[in-house]
Image (tube, rainbow, N blue to C red):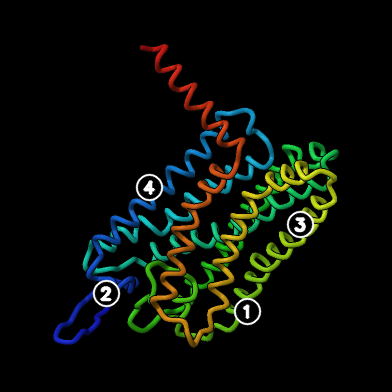
């Protein structure tokens, strides 16, 4: 199945699917952009894989906080991989198209990871709340079974809702030029091409946003109000410093995630442009997943200690073999 699209001076026939209108204003530096994004993507993969391996190989990191961190690192890998490889290919080819099936798959993964990340960040904030506000009951409350249930529920619920919402969107008829004013299949630009009334699906999307953006944000905010209140009541400055250091990495990741999200939603539509929307999405999908493992390794003494031990152990084993 094909459809025709007319440009000034020429006619083109493109296979059924969508045309991605990405970074056309940066056409002169597409190769430079390709190299930059490739480096960032490789750093993201290596950083998150390093965090996962360190936690798996060091028994001192086998605790609830690092269990959730493994989930978060795996999620960041999937999140950025759902967008960047295809974007890199598109930067090198002339016809920047994506099949309907490919677009649907990309939106599935992107939506699942976006919803699940917020649930995992919420679970991690609950873990920090219990560790600081209820330390005597921490091992009982945050048992291995509890952690598995929290993570499992986050993945299962978010996967089910994301699949249902995306399937509903792609069951609607599309028309027009099939041009997506974005560098990947995000919900908002794809929905603009739907021919029928989208009121119902927009209402559902608004409800999902409330459930998986505002509700987790308010829960995290409430958790940190309790955490900071408890820390301030500690008698010694050293005790307050140590208590805060245990949640500083998570707090920075949360601030980064919701800071970008709030910036996205607070920009007035009248001032929003395709270029600004693409740059904001680029920060969310590529930069944030790269920074998360850096925050957890550079700000966390336990992770840095585990990294040193792993390096020393690897050098020792290598010398023994030689």
Q: Is residue 255 above or below residue 210?
A: above
Nearer to us: label 2 or label 4: 4
> Which structural element holds mark 1?
helix
Residue pointed to by mark 3: 223
Q: State the residue lying farthest toward the left.
A: 9
Question: Pointer 3: residues within 10 angstroms few (<14), some, or many (20+)?
Answer: many
Q: Position of residue 156 (x, y in %)?
A: 63, 53
In space, the residues marked 3 and 1 are separated at their CA atoms by 29 Å
Q: Earlier in the sequence, mark 3 or mark 1?
A: 1
- Tell me the quarter of the picture where residue 96 sits: bottom left
Residue pointed to by mark 2: 2
Residue pointed to by mark 4: 42
Q: Earlier in the sequence, mark 3 or mark 4?
A: 4
In space, the residues marked 3 and 2 are separated at their CA atoms by 53 Å
Question: Pointer 1: residues within 10 angstroms few (<14), some, or many (20+)?
Answer: few
Residue pointed to by mark 1: 203
In space, the residues marked 1 and 2 are separated at their CA atoms by 33 Å
């Amino acid at each position: 199945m094909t459809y025709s699209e007319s440009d000034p001076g020429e006619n083109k026939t493109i296979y059924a699917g969508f045309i991605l209108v990405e970074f056309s204003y940066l056409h002169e530096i597409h190769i430079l952009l390709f190299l930059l994004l490739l480096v960032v993507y490789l750093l993201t993969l290596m950083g998150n894989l390093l965090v996962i391996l360190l936690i798996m190989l060091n028994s001192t990191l086998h605790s609830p906080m690092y269990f959730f961190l493994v989930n978060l690192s795996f999620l960041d890998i999937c999140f950025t991989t759902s967008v960047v490889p295809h974007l890199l290919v598109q930067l090198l080819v002339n016809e920047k198209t994506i099949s309907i099936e490919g677009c649907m798959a990309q939106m599935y993964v992107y939506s699942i990871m976006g919803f699940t990340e917020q649930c995992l960040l919420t679970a991690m904030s609950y873990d920090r709340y219990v560790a600081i506000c209820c330390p005597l009951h921490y091992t009982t409350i945050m048992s291995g079974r509890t952690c598995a249930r929290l993570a499992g529920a986050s993945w299962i619920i978010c996967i089910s809702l994301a699949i249902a919402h995306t399937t509903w969107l792609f069951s609607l008829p599309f028309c027009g030029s099939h041009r997506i004013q974005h560098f990947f299949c995000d919900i908002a630009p794809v929905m603009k091409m739907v021919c029928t009334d989208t009121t119902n699906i927009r209402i559902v999307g608004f409800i999902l946003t409330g459930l998986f953006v505002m509700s987790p944000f308010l829960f995290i905010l409430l958790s940190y109000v309790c955490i900071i209140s408890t820390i301030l009541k500690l008698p010694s400055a050293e005790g307050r410093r140590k208590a805060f250091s245990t949640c500083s990495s998570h707090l920075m990741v949360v601030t980064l995630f919701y800071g970008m999200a709030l910036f996205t939603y607070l920009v007035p539509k009248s001032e929003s442009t395709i270029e600004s929307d693409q740059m904001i999405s680029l920060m969310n999908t590529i930069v944030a997943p790269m920074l998360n493992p850096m925050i957890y390794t550079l700000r966390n003494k336990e992770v840095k200690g585990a990294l040193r031990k792993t390096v020393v152990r690897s050098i020792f084993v290598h010398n023994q073999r030689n």
